[in-house]
Structures are given as C-alpha cells and as structure tokens.
Amino acid sequence: MAKGRERTGRVEPRFEADGPGDPASLDLRLSRDDRAGGGVARGTSKGTGKAVSTRSARAAAAPRRRRRSVLGTLVYGTMILGLWGLVAVAGIVAYHASQLPPIDQLSVPKRPPNIAILAADGSLLANRGETGGRTVSIRELPPYLPRAFVAIEDRRFYGHLGIDPIGIARAIGQNLTRRGVAQGGSTLTQQLAKNLFLTQERTASRKIQEAILALWLEHKYSKDEILELYLNRVYFGAGAYGVEAAAQRYFAKPAKDVTLAEAAMLGGLVQAPSRLAPNRNLPAAQARAAQVLAAMQELGFAKPADVQAALAKPAKPARPKGGGSANYVADLVMDVLDDYVGKIETDVSVQTTVDPAIQAVAERALVDELNQKGTRYNVGQGAVVTMRPDGAIRALIGGRDYAQSQFNRATTAKRQPGSAFKPFVYLAAVERGLTPDTVREDAPITIKGWNPENYSRNYSGPVTLRDALAHSLNTVAVRLGQEVGPKAVVQTAQRLGITSPLQANASIALGTSEVTPLELVGAYATFANGGMGVIPYVIASVKTSDGKIVYKRAPSGLGRVIAPDAVGMMNAMLHEVFVSGTAKKGDIPGWDLAGKTGTSQDFRDAWVVGFSGTLVTGVWLGNDD
C-alpha cells in the first residue's frame, strides 16, 4: 500500500484512525486542505511539523474572515434597505403625484384681475378686485426689492432646483433645538407652489405635493419668472396680494418707488403677515426688517452704507388720507363698470373724471363742518357731489368716514330735497308762459285740509316769482304747483334727469318725494349748461394692462330739454338766491353763482345745490335714521 501511494501521489483516507495524532487522520485533513486550496503540498504525511504550522496559520486567518463576513453582511443589508427605502419613497411620491393633475395638463392659474381706479390726472384712487393691486413685472421694481425676499426667505434660490436640502437640514436643526416649529425649510419655489396649487394645511402629504410641484415650476420657468410670480401672488395681510398691493396698502405708493427700508419691511412681512403688519405691530415689523437688511448685507445684496442708512431711518406705514372718500368713487365705478366692459378677465385701469384736488377739498369741508357744528345741530352725516355741467363727476363724497360706513349716501340714500326741488316747479310754470316778474300771492293756503306754511310763518302778500324763489316762499310754490298740475311738475323733473319715483300730489311742490344727491345735482347741471340734459358719469376710459382701450366715453347726453329763453329766466331767478335770498351767505365775490337751498319736513335734511359756468355742487346734511 505504501508503494502504491508513492507511485500515484494519492492519499487515501483511513476512517478507522485512533486519534488526531494518527497519520491517516492527518492525511485526511491535508487532503481537505489541498482540495480547498489551503497551500499545503501533498505528501506531507511523513512529517508533522509543517502540518502544525499550517493549522496555526488557518486559525489566525479565521477571525479576519469572520470579521470581513460581518462587515459584508452589514453593507449588503444596508444596500438592500436603501433600495427598499428608495422604492418606498418612489411609491409615496408616485401616489401623491397621482393626486395632482397630470403634469402635461398643469398650468399656473390666472391671477384674479385687479381693477385700478385712477383719477383724471392718472393718479391712483383705489384698487378693486381680490388682490388689491395690479400685476407688476420684476423689471419695474428696484433691484433691492426682490433681493430682500431672496435674502430672508431663500438665500440659495438661484442655486437649487426647487428644493433646498441644506435649508431643510438647517430648519430641522433649528426646530429641534428650539423644541418647536421655529423655522421652515420651504424654498420660494415651494411657497409659490403652495400658493398656486395647494391649501394652507400643514401635512406631510401637502409637503410632498409641494416639492413635486416646485420641481415642475423650476423645469417650466426661469428663476426670474418664478420670482416674479411669487412677488405677485404672496399674501401681505390686510387683503393685499402681491408686492404692488402691499406697497400701496402700507406705504401709499407703487412698488417701484419703495425705499430700501420699505423693501426690507415688505420682505420680512410674508413670514407672518398678521403679526408683522406695520400698521398693527410696527416694532415687530421694524425688527424683522432689520434682520432682512442684515441678510442682504451679508449676501452682498445691499451696500453697508445703504443698510446703515435704512436702519437709521426705518420704514413706517403711511397715514391714511382723510376718511378714504375716494373709496366712495371706487364703489360707484364698480357698480357701473360691468355695463361698459362686461366680464373682466385681466388687469384693467379705469380712468375716472374725478379731480383729486377737488375731492380732497370737498372731503375736508364736509368733515370739518360736521366736526365743528354737527353736535350742536344734531347732524352726523353728509354727502357731496360735484360735477361739470356736462355731467362729468369731479368729486363724490358718500359719507363722513368710509372706514366707519361704506354706505354711499351720494348715490344710494334717497332723501326729501325740500325746497331744493322748487326749481322744477318754477320751470314748469315758466314753460307755461310765466316770467320772473310774474306776481303771485304769498298768503295762507289750504288744499284738502293741508295747510302749508312759510318757514318764517310770515307772509308778504303779492310777490314776484323771482323774489318768491329767492326767499323760498312755500305758499307761492304750492300755488304754482296747483296751477300747472302736480303731473306736470313730475314730468319736468324727470325730463331733467330725476329717476327716482315721484308722487304727483300737492306736496310735490315742497320736495316731499325722495331723490339722491347725485340725480339732483345732475338735474341742476341742465340749468348750468344752458338747457342740455345730462347723464352723470364717472368713467372716462378703460384700458387693459398692456394699453389696449376697451372703452372710451363718447360725448353724449339727453339733448336739449329746456328752451333757451326758459333756461335764461330760470338762471336769473336762481342767481337771485345767492344775491339776496337764502344762499346769500354762500356767495363768492367775483363769481356768478346760482342755485337753491332746501330743508325737509321737521328739518331732517338740509340741502344746498349751487352752480357756476364750470361746476355744479350739491351738499346734503342729515342723519342716517
């Protein structure tokens, strides 16, 4: 057997070996090692020293192999978990993406149109619409305005793809250290996505959809386009959506004119519009603006000297101008705009006929008079309408303070005009052949049990119509009304533009049927322009934001409604009211004025309507009850 093994070089195992020292046992182990590539040469059974050495080497290598096996398992397991994690994330993203409209059908929703209501000189009177201000191009704005938002809200805006992992990590760290939601990780793009497409709920689902939409926005639009969309959509509080609306609301100026300090305040405002609104919490707004300025300086968005100047003179909200009477004009515009242009789907500017200087003077005069004498005479409200003789409204004040009451007394409140209605009675008489020199009796009169009296309770006997109108003698007006007939008086008033229902009865001569200040002043404009009927109007033109004219008023009116000789006689009598009659204290030296005063029953309403060759103005004073 030994020779056979030497010839063939083969070692046969012997299972009957007595112990580990037996040569056959050793041969078996060597044969296994040889098959396993252990590096031990065949035919070593004749010496045990080398076998022991090999066994020691294997024993030393075994722990290293075991360590490598554990590390490999960990790496492998981590890779598997990572892959499954990616699959899970992909599934979550796909699920939430499926809840959104298909990407190929996705589009930025249109911003609700803004209606900018302008004065005759082009200055802004008010904005109407859901946003509170027009859309502005980023090119219109001073560079530091959009940079203020980037500096405080998303300093890596121009470097990320819609999601900022660094910003998210920083926000998580801040929130953990402060034990609460102290800082958000949303980029400007994510904020825009939320404003455009999503609700304000704070859920994981909404955040995932927000991230998906942010990536879509970054793919679809340039950075400047995204920033422009953001600046025109973000909410600034007080009903202002977009930086133009916010600049007008808080600083009473267009966004293109804001200072660096004001830009910083606007940039800081979007974090918490209700808490940081400068008109509600100025110290907090200024502190936040200082943070914005520091960030702008750090990023090189503003020079240190400019920042120091802005910090030395922080922004403050503009003081409201008076009682905001221009809003009464804006309300009138919105009431009639649909009749001219129909449905509005884009930003438009409406140029009105209103003169801001006259509007301011009229508002101040009304408010001052009510403040000084309102308590004494128990009068709390008033209205003023001023127009050109062609019907173009130059000023309209619908009440004492728009902030306290939006009810437009100039256009909506119907009140008894009292003696201010008498010119229609006298005109009806003149058109039937009477003249200013015609004499009628000023004496007590009774009509079916009704006994109208003069204000003074005195009677003058025979008087001319000129004097009777100048001194507002009630008995003469009633006699004229009976002479021409109440129906004729009603028809005359309607011909001149009175549209409110009028009762054709004996008391119509004393102005007992109710009218609005606007229609009464419009009717008097017929006297001022020489007998041409007018339709009061406030809109001169309407243009889209790109300058396209969608409406332009053409000269129009009701044509001649009073014969020239009749209107001449009426104006002569109405002029006497300011010369020697009830409006004598209102005469202005150097001006030829005409008009009429009036009070209603029990002095509930007080009126004066006067005109020159260029303006017609009516004032009503009274109470809402």
Image (tube, rainbow, N blue to C red):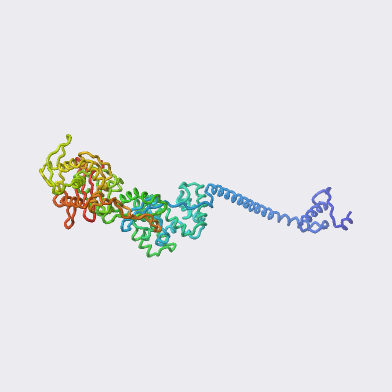
Q: Is residue 228 left or right of residue 495?
A: right
Q: Is residue 233 left or right of residue 442?
A: right
Q: Measuring 32% from the left and 57% from the top, which residue is drawn there? A: 123
Which residue of the protein is positioned furthest toward the left in this rendering? Answer: 461
Q: Position of residue 88 (x, y in %)?
A: 58, 48
Q: Is residue 271 visible?
A: no
Relative to 453, does residue 397 appear above or below in the rendering?
below
- In-front residue for pair 472/163: 472
Tell me the quarter of the image containing the N terminus. Answer: bottom right
Q: Is residue 323 left or right of residue 173?
A: left
Relative to 304, does residue 126 appear above or below in the rendering?
above
Q: Is residue 352 left or right of residue 76?
A: left
Q: Position of residue 47 (x, y in %)?
A: 81, 57
- In-front residue for pair 205/293: 205
Q: Position of residue 30 (x, y in %)?
A: 79, 55
Relative to 174, does residue 499 appear above or below in the rendering?
above
Q: Position of residue 402 (x, y in %)?
A: 30, 48
